[in-house]
Image (tube, helix red, strand yellow):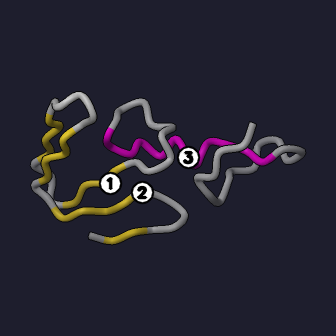
C-alpha cells in the first residue's frame, strides 16, 4: 500500500473493500487507487476528481490537494 498525501491510497490488487453498509467492492486490477477525498463518482475507487477542483481566486488551475473547501 502506498499513501500519497496529495491523492489516493494505492493498493496492490486484487482488492476487496468493505463499505459502511457491508457491501463489498472488488477489483482484479494489479494496482487500485482508493479515494480518500470523497469527491469520486465511483466510490471507493479514485476517478481523479480531486484534480478538477480549483482554489478560490484561481479559476481553471487544478488543485494540488484533496482538502475540502467551501
Q: Give the range drawn in magenta.
A: 44-55
Q: Mark 1 points at which residue?
A: 33
Q: Nearer the viewer, residue 16 or 62?
A: 16
Label 1 Cα crowd, 10 Å radius (few <14 / some 14-19 / many 20+): many
**From the viewer's perspective, is residue 36 above or below residue 4?**
above
Q: Is residue 34 above or below residue 40?
A: below
Instruction: Assign a secondary structure to mark 3.
Output: helix
For image coordinates 75% across by 36% down, the residue present is: 70
Q: Does the magenta stretch include residue 54?
A: yes
Asked whether 23 falls inside the magenta stretch, the response is no
Name the foreground residue: 25 vs 30: 25
User: Which secondary structure type mostly characterizes the magenta part of the structure?
Assistant: loop
Q: Is residue 50 left or right of residue 44?
A: right
Q: Which mark is residue 8?
A: 2
Q: Do the residues labelled 3 and 2 touch (CB within 8 Å)?
A: yes
In this rendering, position of residue 51 left or right of residue 48: right
**Residue 12 drawn at (x, y percent):** 18, 64
Answer whether labels 1 and 2 touch (C-beta < 8 Å). yes
Tell me residue 63's x, y (percent): 68, 53
Q: Is mark 2 on a helix, strand or loop?
A: loop
Mark 1: secondary structure: strand
In the figure, is residue 65 to the left or right of 49? right
- What residue is rendered at 51% in x and 67% in y? 5
How far apart are the alpha carbons under marks 1 and 3? 12 Å
- Tag shown at residue 50: 3
Residue at image location 32% in from the left, 40% down from the top: 44
Q: Around disc 3, counting alpha carbons within 10 Å, would you say few (fewer than 14), some (14 to 19), or many (20 or more)? A: many
Please tell me which of labels 1 and 3 falls first in the chain. Answer: 1
Amino acid at each position: 500500500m502506498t499513501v500519497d498525501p496529495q491523492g489516493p491510497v494505492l493498493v496492490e490488487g486484487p482488492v476487496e473493500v468493505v463499505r459502511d453498509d457491508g457491501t463489498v467492492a472488488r477489483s482484479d486490477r494489479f494496482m487500485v487507487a482508493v479515494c480518500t477525498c470523497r469527491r469520486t463518482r465511483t466510490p471507493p475507487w479514485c476517478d481523479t476528481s480531486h484534480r478538477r477542483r480549483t482554489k478560490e481566486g484561481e479559476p481553471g488551475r487544478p488543485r494540488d490537494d484533496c482538502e475540502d473547501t467551501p
